[in-house]
């Protein structure tokens, strides 16, 4: 295992630990981390150019989603907070169909061999799942860990992000998203 990969896994483990204990009484968080809350980008900045593949190996980029508000969710099969938030992402996708596209990008190094069985086992087949086994998206967005979701406007600019597992069914997050989504029709 290279040093770079070790550091990446260690940072994931630290954020996963922070997420796991964030609900515990007296758990301390760094001031600038607001786990599970939407933090707006002011001003919105262009999203980095990243590429990834679908579960069948077909190449995709963020440019493929321009023209639609897109929620990019970076996750991994080993990440328990990621697994916790996935069902609510599916419900968000269904509730906001036509107004929001969800792009769930796995950062697993094992690629499709690791992710396909996981998707099937956890009944995640309705979420659009993509692969980034080299963690290019993680690095391009300069993220601290997983899960992290980035909201990108139809113009390709980052509108904000959510670090840590989020309750996408919760009123607070839905209220934050509403003004950023165009009305249906």
Image (cartoon, grey):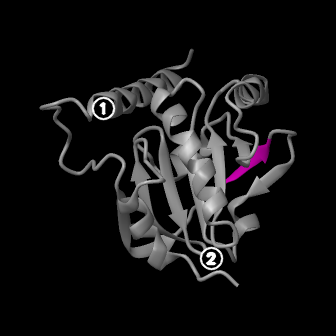
Determine whether 129 is above or below 82 in the image: below
Return the mark for residue 180.
Answer: none
Residue 69, quarter of picture: bottom right
Residue 49 appears in the picture as rendered: no
Q: Is residue 129 left or right of residue 79?
A: right
Residue 111, quarter of picture: top right
Q: Is residue 57 left or right of residue 102?
A: right
Q: Which residues are magenta?
A: 50-54
Packing grade of label 2 (10 A; few <14, some 14-19, many >=20) is some
Q: Residue, x 80% and y 45% (percent of image)?
A: 54
Asked whether residue 185 is drawn in magenta, I would say: no
Which quarter of the figure is the N terminus placed in? top right
Find disc 1 in the rendering and name its residue.
18
Q: Residue furthest top?
A: 1
Determine whether 170 is above or below 70 in the image: above
Q: How many marks?
A: 2
The main secondary structure of the magenta stretch is strand
Q: Residue, x 60% and y 52% (percent of image)?
A: 91
Residue 170, quarter of picture: bottom left
Disc 2 on helix, strand or loop? loop
Q: Is residue 93 left or right of residue 147?
A: right
Q: Earlier in the sequence, mark 2 or mark 1?
A: 1
Q: Position of residue 53 (x, y in %)?
A: 78, 45
Residue 180 appears in the picture as rendered: yes
Q: Residue, x 48% and y 53% (percent of image)?
A: 168
Q: Residue, x 74% and y 46% (percent of image)?
A: 126
Closer to the camera in the image, 22 or 137: 22
Find disc 2 in the rendering and name its residue.
154
Disc 1 on helix, strand or loop? helix
Q: Position of residue 55 (x, y in %)?
A: 81, 39
């Amino acid at each position: 295992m290279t040093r770079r990969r070790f550091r990446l896994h260690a940072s994931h483990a630290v954020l996963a630990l922070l997420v796991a204990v964030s609900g515990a009484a007296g758990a301390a968080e760094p001031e600038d981390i607001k786990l599970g809350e939407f933090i707006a980008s002011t001003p919105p900045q262009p999203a980095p150019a990243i590429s990834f593949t679908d579960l069948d190996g077909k190449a995709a980029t963020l440019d493929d989603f321009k023209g639609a508000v897109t929620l990019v969710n970076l996750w991994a099969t080993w990440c328990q907070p990621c697994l916790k938030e996935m069902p609510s992402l599916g419900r968000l996708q269904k509730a906001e169909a036509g107004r929001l596209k969800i792009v769930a990008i796995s950062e697993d190094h094992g690629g499709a061999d690791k992710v396909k069985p996981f998707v099937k086992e956890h009944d995640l087949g309705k979420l659009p799942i993509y692969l980034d086994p080299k963690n290019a998206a993680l690095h391009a967005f300069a993220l601290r860990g997983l899960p992290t979701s980035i909201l990108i406007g139809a113009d390709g600019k980052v509108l904000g992000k959510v670090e840590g597992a989020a309750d996408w069914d919760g009123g607070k997050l839905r209220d934050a998203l509403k003004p950023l989504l165009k009305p249906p029709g």
